[in-house]
Amino acid sequence: MVGDHVRRFPALARRVVSEGHMVGNHTHNHVKLHLAAPSRIRAQLDVAHAAIEWATGQTPRAFRAPHGIAVCFSVPRRETAATPFSDGRSAVFDTARPGVEEIRRRVRKRLRPGAIVLLHDGDGYDPEGDRMQTAKALPGIIEDAQAAGYGFGS
């Protein structure tokens, strides 16, 4: 969860938790950590962490650096101790809005045992960003995964 988005939409963050989903820290403003000074990284993670706990009552159990790019020495121990839940290999680049069927094809291509598929529910910089292609692709993605014998969990 992006901390700034959590502060703007706390009810949505609470709903995510109430539906049983895992909560992760994705920084406060979606900054590229590999370009940031250690003090800025610490502030980004601390502010997001506090926002997530404030809104949801849950401590983030996962961490993903924006754009999947984190320099290991730049990310504080608390976040590296959390479960990293994605890297670039799981990305389908739905943020480029390639079309519903292309998003679905890209996910199908990455399905394998233990796979974690990275999709976006919003824009990291614009909390009102358009992700309707991803939302429209999701029923087909779920159908494809279930047809291939996969299940879902968090």
Image (cartoon, helix red, strand yellow):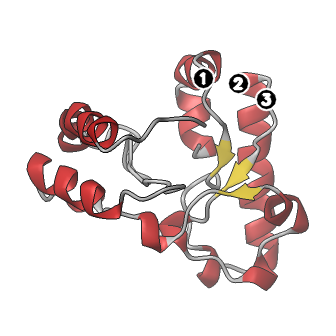
- Disc 1 designates what residue? 10
- Specify the quadrant that holds the N terminus: top right
Kindly state the secondary structure of the residue where label 3 is placed.
loop
Q: Position of residue 126 (x, y in %)?
A: 38, 47
Q: CA distance from mark 3 to mark 1?
A: 12 Å
* Marks 3, 1: nearer the viewer: 3
Q: CA distance from mark 3 to mark 2?
A: 8 Å
> Label 1 sits on what residue type?
Pro
Q: Amino acid at mark 3?
A: Gln
Q: Residue at x 72, y 36 (%)?
A: 51
Residue on which the image places disc 3:
58
Residue 100 seen in the figure:
yes
For residue 55, which numbered disc appears in the image? 2
Q: Position of residue 37 (x, y in %)?
A: 74, 81
Front-most of 121 and 148? 148
Marks 2,1: beta carbons within 8 A:
yes
Element carrying mark 2: helix
